[in-house]
Image: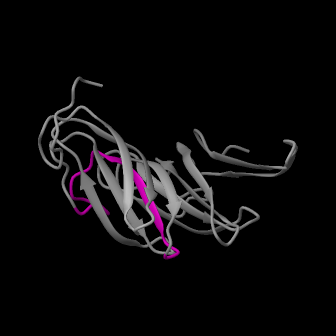
Amino acid sequence: TCRGNTDIWIIKIDSIGNPIWQKTIGGSGLDRITSMNQTSDKGYIVGGNSESPISGEKSEICNGQLDCWILKLDSACNIVWQNTIGGSQYDDLVYTEETDDGGYILGGFSKSDISGDKTEDNINFTYDCWIIKVDSLGNIVKQNTIGGKGEDYLKSIHQTFDGGYILSAMSDSKISGDKTQNSISYL
């Protein structure tokens, strides 16, 4: 049963597509999934967004209008922990991935200045890429806001073999802020 506007729906299927189990996770508002990866313990890290207050499976309030919502699930899709991360505006989580140290790298974009969990202002009151590193329990370890004076939308982030990260983004920013090359045209 749906708990609110939209919920996260996870379905485990066998090798030929037959459902094995399914799980609905959400609160009384809008909740959506944007990323899901299996973790080294055979569980899952789920990333998405939420506008829900504490309700259903949602155990934390939102800081702003839309926050990032991460959930660690065990192999049977039971919630191990969850964290709602955001500032006072719109914060959109796009990708989650387990890192070599057992934590997780989160990537998305944010319109929030310093507020809630956000520790850096945006470059120009528009969307900037927002990278968040959390530990194995979902606690924020560090974060970085990257962008220029235009709109910058992170699309993916991955850990590299040297322990760093590589990200891809769409941008219409000219040289400004962290951006060192002009965009050729608008989005």
Using the rendered view, name the quadrant where residue 115 is placed: bottom left
Q: Residue at x 64, y 70 (%)?
A: 40
Q: Is residue 84 above or below residue 186?
A: below
From the top left corner, tell me how far across and down residue 182 is, in percent.
Answer: 16, 34
Q: Is residue 10 above or below residue 137?
A: above
154 relative to 149 in the view: left or right: right
Q: How many marks?
A: 0
Question: Is residue 146 shown to the viewer in this render?
Answer: yes
Using the rendered view, name the quadrant where residue 86 is placed: bottom left
Of 10 and 153, nearer the camera is: 153
Point out the image quarter for the N terminus: top right
Q: Can residue 118 be found in the magenta stretch?
A: yes
Q: Residue at x 85, y 49 (%)?
A: 14
39 relative to 97 in the view: left or right: right
Question: Is residue 27 shown to the viewer in this render?
Answer: no
Q: Residue at x 74, y 66 (%)?
A: 75
Look at the image and name its color scheme: one colour
Q: Is residue 118 above or below residue 27?
A: below
105 relative to 15 in the view: left or right: left
Main structural element of the magenta stretch: helix, strand or loop? Answer: loop
Q: Residue at x 52, y 59 (%)?
A: 97
Point out the image quarter for the C terminus: top left
Of 155 and 65, nearer the camera is: 155
From the top left corner, tell me how far across and down residue 47 is, in percent.
Answer: 53, 54
Q: Can residue 174 be found in the magenta stretch?
A: no
46 relative to 135 in the view: left or right: right
From the top left corner, tell me how far across and down residue 157 is, in percent.
Answer: 43, 52
The segment highlighted magenta reads 101-119
In the picture as drawn, the residue positioned furthest to the front comes out as 161
